[in-house]
């Protein structure tokens, strides 16, 4: 059983010649706002699409992921299960409406690349499998996940691995940009909410000298910024986002907070950066004994490097070369972090060429999408046929 890979060439031509249809689908997906935590309109859109395709095994799981199962009809007891996923949430909140514009070469709009391109690739693959009655020797599970970005902490993928992980033999994580990426490394990551609560506050003139939450938080950030991050055996970075502080121009603020992140390709470096942060916080706790200074961890995962000579990467690269794509091993933080951390062979691939991701000024190159979708379709068919 199973379809020889060479027999999918007419379908690959169908994808290549269907750029207008793909771009229309891409825009319809990106037009639905889906910031992390608010993905259900897009999930419902996808569910209705699959129902129109006549696909019956469509469910919404307990956390909000859309799951499609295509079991193999093979009687081989050694048949495997391949999971293909694409996250539906976006890193920024575009408001009630996504502003999408285009010119001859590009389409512009938040989420148009990350990850509407990946969702388009996965949705199109499922539609083509159904349309052409394709059957494979291995089982396929498709997941459209919620909560991949930011404080979502990959909760959608974590739920899928919790529900199906024991049966999954390989994972294809379909991401947005860089066609040719072969991501086999998860970047180590530490995310926390830094919060300062002074309890007292007061009048800016009369009570001057009392602890100021905004000032203390600013000093902590400034002190860490002078820490020289180790970079010799792996890149290490840090970032501060969503700084919030209360108080008017004449009132000493009681509360202040920010989101704080450290990433590193080296677990030792990640630990050193965390220790530096903890040391700085300890110093300020001594200096301000009556002030609550906290770092609440929101996400943490180690750096993982899966062997680049594993079969999963060899098959991926073989497909890319057949399509004239130049492969490049990369590191990243995606839903793949979860399956890699659970020891499941996982590859992340890109579906387009896009830029300014994680911003409201995101855009994608139109002509790149058909090639990216052909890659997604062919990688999934290859894994389902011969993993």
Image: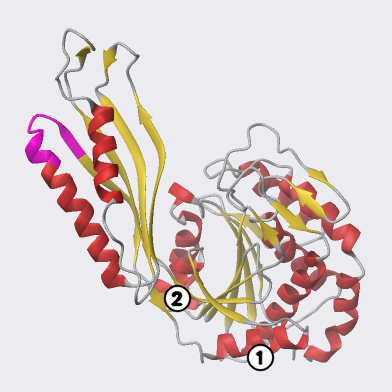
Q: Measured along the vertical axis of the image, is residue 210 above or below residue 239?
A: above
In the image, 200: left or right of 270? left
Lower sequence index among marks 1 and 2: 2
Q: Is residue 381 magenta?
A: no
Instruction: Look at mark 2 in the image and give the residue it sits on.
Output: 166
Residue 367 image offset from top left, x and y in percent: 83, 64
The local crowd at label 1, few if under 14, some if 14 to 19, many if 20 or more residues have their Cα within 10 Å, is some
The local crowd at label 2, few if under 14, some if 14 to 19, many if 20 or more residues have their Cα within 10 Å, is few
Asked where in the image residue 174 lies, by quadrant, the reply is bottom right
- State the residue at coordinates (43%, 47%): 151
Name the quadrant of the C terminus: bottom right
- State the residue at coordinates (24%, 58%): 274
Does dot 2 land on a helix, a strand or a loop? helix
Instruction: Look at mark 1 in the image and give the residue it sits on.
Output: 386
Name the quadrant of the N terminus: bottom right
Q: Is residue 233 visible?
A: yes
Asked where in the image residue 364 lies, by quadrant, the reply is bottom right
Number of the label disc, if any, that sits on residue 314: none
The Cα–Cα distance between marks 1 and 2, rounded to whole angstroms, is: 20 Å
Task: Kindly check if marks 1 and 2 are in contact, taking CB atoms under 8 A apart as contact.
Answer: no
Residue 262 image offset from top left, x and y in percent: 35, 57
Residue 64 image offset from top left, x and y in percent: 55, 49
In the image, 33: left or right of 37? right
Q: Measured along the vertical axis of the image, is residue 144 above or below residue 73?
A: above
Tell me where the magenta segment starts and ends, as one range. Answer: 284-293
- Choose mark 1 or mark 2, whichever is in front: 1
């Amino acid at each position: 059983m199973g379809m020889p890979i060479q027999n999918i060439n007419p379908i690959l031509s169908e994808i290549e010649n269907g750029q207008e249809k793909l771009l229309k689908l891409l825009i319809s997906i990106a037009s639905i706002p889906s910031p992390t935590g608010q993905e259900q309109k897009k999930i419902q859109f996808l569910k209705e699409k699959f129902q129109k395709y006549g696909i019956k095994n469509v469910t919404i799981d307990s956390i909000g992921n859309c799951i499609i199962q295509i079991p193999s009809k093979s009687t081989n007891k050694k048949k495997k299960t391949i999971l293909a996923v694409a996250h539906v949430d976006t890193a920024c909140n575009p408001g009630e409406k996504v502003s999408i514009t285009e010119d001859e070469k590009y389409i512009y709009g938040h989420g148009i690349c990350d990850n509407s391109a990946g969702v388009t690739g996965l949705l199109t693959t499922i539609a083509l499998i159904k349309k052409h009655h394709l059957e494979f020797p291995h089982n396929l599970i498709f997941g459209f996940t919620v909560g991949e970005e930011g404080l979502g902490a990959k909760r959608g993928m974590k739920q899928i691995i919790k529900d199906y992980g024991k049966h999954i033999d390989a994972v294809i994580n379909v991401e947005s940009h860089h066609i040719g990426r072969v991501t086999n490394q998860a970047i180590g990551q530490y995310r926390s909410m830094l919060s300062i609560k002074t309890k007292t506050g007061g009048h800016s003139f009369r009570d001057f000298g009392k602890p100021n939450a905004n000032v203390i938080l600013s000093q902590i950030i400034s002190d860490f910024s002078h820490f020289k991050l180790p970079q010799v055996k792996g890149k290490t970075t840090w970032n501060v986002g969503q700084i919030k502080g209360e108080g008017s121009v004449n009132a000493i603020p009681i509360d202040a907070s920010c989101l704080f992140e450290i990433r590193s390709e080296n677990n030792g470096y990640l630990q050193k950066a965390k220790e530096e942060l903890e040391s700085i916080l300890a110093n300020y706790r001594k200096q301000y004994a009556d002030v609550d200074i906290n770092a609440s961890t929101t996400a943490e995962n180690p750096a993982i490097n899966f062997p680049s000579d594993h079969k999963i990467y060899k098959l991926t690269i073989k497909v890319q070369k057949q399509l004239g794509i130049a492969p490049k091993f990369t590191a990243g933080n995606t839903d793949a972090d979860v399956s890699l951390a659970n020891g499941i062979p996982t590859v992340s691939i890109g579906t387009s060429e896009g830029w300014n991701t994680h911003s409201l000024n995101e855009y994608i190159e139109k002509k790149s999408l058909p090639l990216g979708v052909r890659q997604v379709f062919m990688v999934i068919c290859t894994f389902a046929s011969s993993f």
